[in-house]
Image (tube, rainbow, N blue to C red):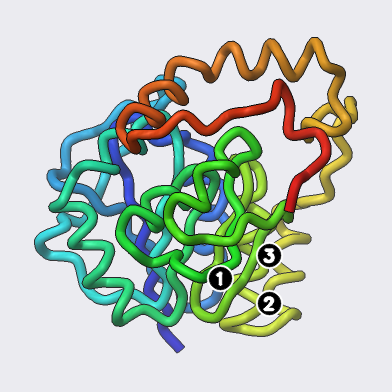
Amino acid sequence: MTLRFGLLCFPGVQQLDLTGPYEVFASATGATVHLIWKDLQPVRSATGLMLTPDTLLSEAPDFDVLCIPGGGGVNALLTDETVLAFIRDKAAKARFVTSVCTGALVLGKAGLLSGKRAATHWNAMDFLPAFGAIPVWERFVQDGSIITAGGVTSGIDFGLAVVAELLGRAEAETIQLALEYAPAPPFDAGQPETASEAVVREAMSRMAGSRQEREALLGCLLYTSPSPRDKRQ
């Protein structure tokens, strides 16, 4: 069984949003993984790592799984009708349409999240209702053929869940073991409700520029609390 995965590879992508699920998908039996963009020149990720697309938007095949990663570069995609039209077209033919982190905002802008339960990075959850989505504070959320993952590292969890849907739990567990994916972080600060107030403020400060640009693009000012520590549903 041949499975075709397509991941959007754009300037300013958060590399782990892409490379986390990429590693899982590429490890699946019979999988072909495409990195898709407008041209095939290397793109610089949000943290500087260079990534090289291998498939043009204009020549991309249909996919079993379409995945939109997040990152600061998402802001430009929110007004890029070429990309949004591509996503709408491929989504109509895919078994699963997926996102990691703020990639969910691109799915929302493409009109794919209306009435859907969805996850995204904790600092972007309050944008989801603007697209008619229902925010859910989970590592990843499936609503029909739409699967959205939370922030950055959740892409690995999500990737394993997608493989389980397509090829069964045994294949997903085999990949998990081969990758030795057994997370045990040294600190319990991976969510706003477990991090200290000072750490939350510092993280939000570092993301403020991208968030303010996003607010301007979407024509709204959404953040009303210094921390989403209560995981509002």
- Cα separation, mark 2 vs mark 1, equals 7 Å
Name which of mark 2 and mark 1 comes first in the sequence: 1
Q: Is residue 220 left or right of residue 123?
A: left
Q: Is residue 202 left or right of residue 94?
A: right
What's under tag 3, amino acid-wise?
Answer: Ile
Secondary structure found at label 2: helix
What's under tag 1, amino acid-wise?
Answer: Ala
**Residue drawn at (63%, 60%) of the image:** 158
Marks 3 and 2: in contact by CB < 8 Å? yes
Q: Residue 187 appears in which quarter of the rendering?
A: top right
Query: Observer-nearest residue: 73 or 62?
Result: 73
**Vertical position of residue 191 compared to residue 3: above or below:** above
Query: Which residue is identified by label 3?
Result: 175
Q: Residue 147 appears in which quarter of the rendering?
A: bottom right
Q: Is residue 7 left or right of residue 22?
A: left
Secondary structure found at label 1: loop
Q: Residue 194 appears in which quarter of the rendering?
A: top right
Query: Which residue is identified by label 1?
Result: 28
